[in-house]
Amino acid sequence: AVAAARQLNVLTSEEFDERIAAALAALASLPLNPQGLPAAYYHADTLETLGKPDASAIGMGRLLNALQTCRRAAERRQSDPPRLRLSV
């Protein structure tokens, strides 16, 4: 959603960076199960595991897909030349 919002100019580059940094910090602080994998569900406010700490292969795939999308959006932004806004 953040990458799409950036592409649609709903978010500025700075807002995109702030939101991605916050999401990555949250991911880095998630408690992992004994196998070293993230649980399927976490409480949004406390980041505590909800229910069983079992990992979800589908959930991990979705997370990896979202991270790949954000990486591509960041790479595009770095390779794009600065755009000028012309007022008419």
Image (spheres, rainbow, N blue to C red):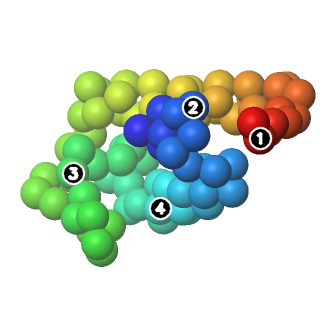
Q: Secondary structure at mark 2?
A: helix
Tell me the quarter of the picture where residue 19 sits. bottom right
Disc 2 or 1, which lies upstream in sequence? Answer: 2
* Dot 2 amino acid type: Gln
Q: Residue at x 42, y 47 (%)?
A: 36
Nearest to the observer: residue 66 or residue 10: 10
Q: Is residue 32 visible?
A: yes
Q: Residue at x 60, y 57 (%)?
A: 15
Report the quarter where the C terminus lies: top right
Q: Nearer the viewer, mark 2 or mark 4?
A: 2
Cα gap from disc 2 to disc 1, whole angstroms = 21 Å
Disc 2 or 4, which lies upstream in sequence? Answer: 2
* Dot 3 amino acid type: Tyr
What x and y, as percent, mark residue 41? 21, 51
Position of residue 45 relative to residue 7, above or below, is: below
Cα gap from disc 1 to disc 3, whole angstroms = 48 Å
* Label disc, if present, on residue 87 of the rendered structure: 1
Cα gap from disc 2 to disc 4, whole angstroms = 23 Å
